[in-house]
Amino acid sequence: MVAGMLTVFAILLIVIYGSRMLITIINKIAPEEAKASPRAASGEVSAKARAVLEAAVRELTAGKGHITNITKIQ
């Protein structure tokens, strides 16, 4: 029974340290991309696009839904 518990413990240690090593290697090979600075939300969406979005929401929600904020996702 002790041998089985030691085996499980050893395998868990291998998994933990192996995953840490893998994360370190991946971060060195492919570093995280820098995020673009967020732009101001005002003026990003044209009046025509806003009208189209509002009409679509009105149609899909049977007049119960409305748009409060439009944010462009990068």
Image: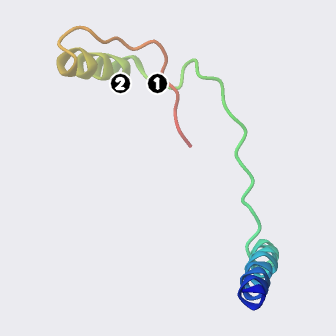
Contact check, label 1 and label 2, Cβ < 8 Å: yes
Q: Residue at x 80, y 74 (%)?
A: 20
Percent of width and height locating residue 26 = 74, 76
Image quadrant of residue 56? top left
Taking the spot 49% from the left edge, 17% from the top edge, the residue there is: 69
**In the image, 4: left or right of 56?**
right
- Residue denoted by label 2: 49
Say if 30 sits above or below 3 in the image: above
Tell me: residue 16, above or below residue 37: below
* Residue type (three-letter) at the residue carrying disc 1: Val
Q: Which corner quadrant of the image does residue 25 belong to?
A: bottom right
Q: Which residue is mark 1?
A: 45
Q: Residue at x 52, y 33 (%)?
A: 72
- Judge by depth and name the residue closer to the eye, 9 or 67: 9
Amino acid on which disc 2 is placed: Ala
Left/right placement of residue 39 relative to residue 60 reads: right
Q: Badge 2, how many Cα within 10 Å: few under 14, some, many 20+?
A: few
Q: Nearer the viewer, residue 21 or 7?
A: 7
Report the quarter where the N terminus lies: bottom right
Describe residue 54's horizontal placement relative to residue 36 as left or right.
left
